[in-house]
Amino acid sequence: MKKVRFLQSIHLKFVLIYVLLILIAMQIIGVYFVRQLEKELVNNFTNSITERVGLLAYNIEQELEKKRDDTSPTLEEDLEIVLKDFTSMQGISSKDILEVRVIDQNRRIIGTSNPNSEQIVGKKTNQLSVTNALLAGTASNKVFVDQKNGDRIRVLTVPIRLQDDVGANTSLDPNIGESIQSDQEILGAVYLMATMEPVYEQMKKINSIFASGTTIALVITALLGVFLAQTITRPMSEMRKQALEMAKGNFSRKAKVYGYDEIGQLALTFNNLTRKLQEAQATTEGERRKLSSVLAHMTDGVIATDRKGRVILINDPAASMLNVSRETVLSDPIVSLLGLEEAHTFESLLANQDSLILDFSTKTEPFILRATVSAIQKETGFINGIIIVLHDITEQEKIDQDRREFVANVSHELRTPLTTMRSYLDALADGAWEDKELAPNFLHVTQTETERMIRMVNDLLQLSKLDSQDYRFSRDPINFVKFYHYIIDRFEMTIEQGISFVRDLPNEAIYVAVDQDKITQVLDNIISNAIKYSPEGGTITFSIEQHTHEIVVSIKDQGMGIPKANLTKIFERFYRVDKARTRKLGGTGLGLAIAKEIIEAHDGRIWADSKEGYGTAIYFTLPIESENDEEWE
């Protein structure tokens, strides 16, 4: 088992959960506290500005009354003094008040607290809040964000009314932004802009202090969490080590008990379980070893299933026979594993319990298995599953098939000439021997059929010797080019069909170690076939190609050719492409089979290449020995 990584350990998870709980709790408390504090500071700031704006409106109303009564000819100077006194009031920082403007009934700016904005005095304003204050007596209290620097700015617009009592000019609700109007005449309006950034700067400092406190608290919490986690994970880690040792088969180790709480009781129970498992393991180990030894050394495949037909055991020979992995087929249905879904069910296998023949042959390779089925029964008679034993009978089936084919072919090949001989002998016995014209012909046919049977028997004896494991070739080094010329010359001297021979042979000597008599037989069989199937006036080409470790010998004719589907079968015993013509020409159907056995015994290969109507080429290879040619000469 892999070692638990730190990032996956329960130790880290416990500490993280503990720290996260504290962090979440502190964040919830902190968010609530900061929001309430921010709300309180903003309200205090707004209330302070609002109260003083009301007093400012009253003072300006007095100055405007003086101007109306012509008691104060210098209104601008008086307003400047009033605004200056307002910005220096206690509780209001001069930095907080960005600007205060006084607007008369005609929306003309008659005063400002910002010396840099004196050029706007005397000009009219089109601000909506000022228009609402002058016409409807509506006060406004809004917050805007400066697009240049992002500062939050509170803007208050308060109407100036003609009244008698101080501070009764207007009452502004800072949260709603509307004034409680009266019937007094509106003399003008006060337009105030104040920045709220100092309030939020204070909030930033408070948040910073709170974050620092949270960090310190989390560090202390983490340390405490690590200590607490160790008291829980250390016994668990000890039991984990014990479990790993048990998985390895070591039952002698005991888990250390750190206390007698719930985890300590678990450790004691774990040690008791280890002791009992050790006793049980000792009693079952012997039986397990016996079963494992039997299954491992069996050459047959064994498959066991549960009572529902699912695979619970399969040994290596069975997995190899079925070409599956043991891990992937466990729990698979047995009928699916054996490919019996269409013919059988698990219940039918239980009912029959007979031997089954499983054919897994392909186009190129035969593969046949015999499956013997037996039930697994308890003492009560309840069937708990089945056991299937697989035995590879491919070679046995192949031998039986070859034997049947061989007997059939030999019987057929011998029956034909014997039947012919019997017919002619019966005719001679009935008096045909007295006929001087028929008798010689009948005897000639009988002799020909007898020679044909002798040739076939000799070929069969030859194949029998080649099949024998005790048969040995006498290999000697020969100059194969010279030897090949000799074989061709021998056929060329006896040929009668007007067939021409073409030799494409190298001039230099090529030495190979072969049994000269056997290779002569191979060449005789191949060349004889080429002559038999060549048309009159045809050409037979003989060639040799030399490669690094072998030579390739070929004989090409211009006969009728062989169909592509039959090329791989012409080296089988008794196989004929055209049986009628082969018998007419005197063939036994064993020549190429003998040639194949001899060439393969020389560690070579033999094959054919043909195209119908264009002739056939037979190729075979012979290995070149590593000795130098000079030593053979």
Image (cartoon, rainbow, N blue to C red):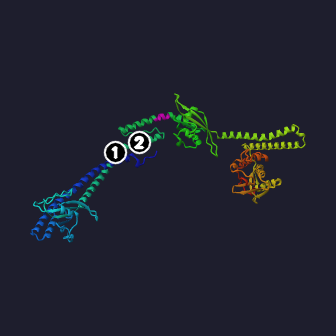
| Quadrant occupied by the C terminus | bottom right
* Mark 1 lies on residue: 228
| Residue type at tag 1 | Leu
- Residue 281 covered by magenta stretch: yes
In the image, 427 versus 1, the foreground residue is 427
* Mark 2 lies on residue: 238
Question: Could you tell me how many numbered marks the image carries?
Answer: 2
Earlier residue among tags 1 and 2: 1
Q: Is residue 613 visible?
A: yes
| Residue type at tag 2 | Glu
Specify whether 378 is left or right of 178.
right
- Residue 276 covered by magenta stretch: no
Q: Position of residue 613 (x, y in %)?
A: 73, 54
In which quarter of the view is residue 555 placed? bottom right
Per the rendered image, the range of residues in magenta is 277-282
Q: Residues within 10 Å of mark 2 (few under 14, many from 20)?
A: some
